Amino acid sequence: MKTIDTAGFETIKAVVAIFERLESNGPHLLFGPKLTGFGQGFLMPVGGKYKPSDENNPVTAAHREGYEEAHLEGWSNFVPGRITITIRDKRQILPIDIVIYTSWSGRLVWNDEFEWLKFMSLSEILAGKILPCDDIWLKRILIDHKPTSFNILCGKDREDVLDFEVLDFDPKK
């Protein structure tokens, strides 16, 4: 992967909470079109920036985001990967932890960050409007079941992908 000097770049740590529901035709994931913030205009899972109360813990952050954005409380989780996005022109690095919930409670109600949220098959998500390269990490984690670290180098914004690399994920790093 191309390397750039990231000295002085702002780091914005975030998390996505992917709620999974098993149906007769396979797993369905909670996604919806984002109306605000990062990923605006694209199908996205719930998620957002870490807060101090999360104590830098991806499961804690995902639990909070899941409740804030969808009124769901996840309780059976695993952390299968991390996406690190470097946006050169904005001088930002966005490490995004991925948390998948296979069990949860609550009644799905979304906030004003989404047009709607619903459980969709992976093929529906991949056929929809997703960010460049999201298909790669989604397939690797959800179909191949491989813990994944995915690095994306962008130019002016998240849609301007210059390079990427896929690595095995080590949760201790």
Image (cartoon, rainbow, N blue to C red):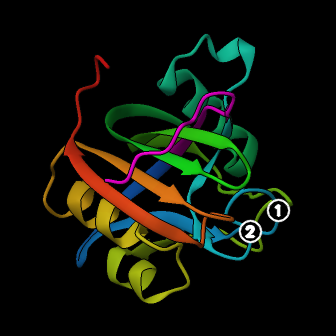
Magenta-drawn stretch contains 3: yes
Quadrant for residue 51, please give it.
Answer: top right
Secondary structure type for disc 1: loop
Mark 1 closeness class: few <14, some 14–19, many ≥20 residues within 10 Å: few
Magenta-drawn stretch contains 105: no
Q: Is residue 22 visible?
A: no
* Mark 1 → mark 2, Cα distance in angstroms: 5 Å
Is the residue 65 above or below the residue 126 in the image?
above
In this view of the protein, which residue sits in the foreground, 166 or 23? 166
Residue drawn at x 64%, y 75% as measured from the top left: 42
- The magenta span reads 1-17
Q: Is residue 122 visible?
A: yes
Is the residue 55 above or below the residue 141 in the image?
above
Question: What x and y, as percent, mark residue 121?
Answer: 37, 76
Asked if the residue under mark 2 is in contact with the one under mark 1, i.e. CB atoms within 8 Å, the reply is: yes
What's under tag 2, amino acid-wise? Gln
Is the residue 153 above or below the residue 77 in the image?
below
* The C terminus, quarter of image: top left
Q: Main secondary structure of the magenta part?
A: loop
Residue drawn at x 56%, y 22% as measured from the top left: 60
What's under tag 1, amino acid-wise? Thr
In this view of the protein, which residue sits in the foreground, 69 or 58? 58
Q: Which residue is mark 1?
A: 36
Mark 2 closeness class: few <14, some 14–19, many ≥20 residues within 10 Å: some
In this view of the protein, which residue sits in the foreground, 157 or 79? 157
Question: What x and y, as percent, mark residue 163?
Answer: 39, 63
Question: Which dot marks residue 40?
Answer: 2
Question: What x and y, as percent, mark residue 1?
Answer: 31, 53
Question: What x and y, as percent, mark residue 170?
Answer: 23, 27
Question: Which dot marks residue 97?
Answer: none
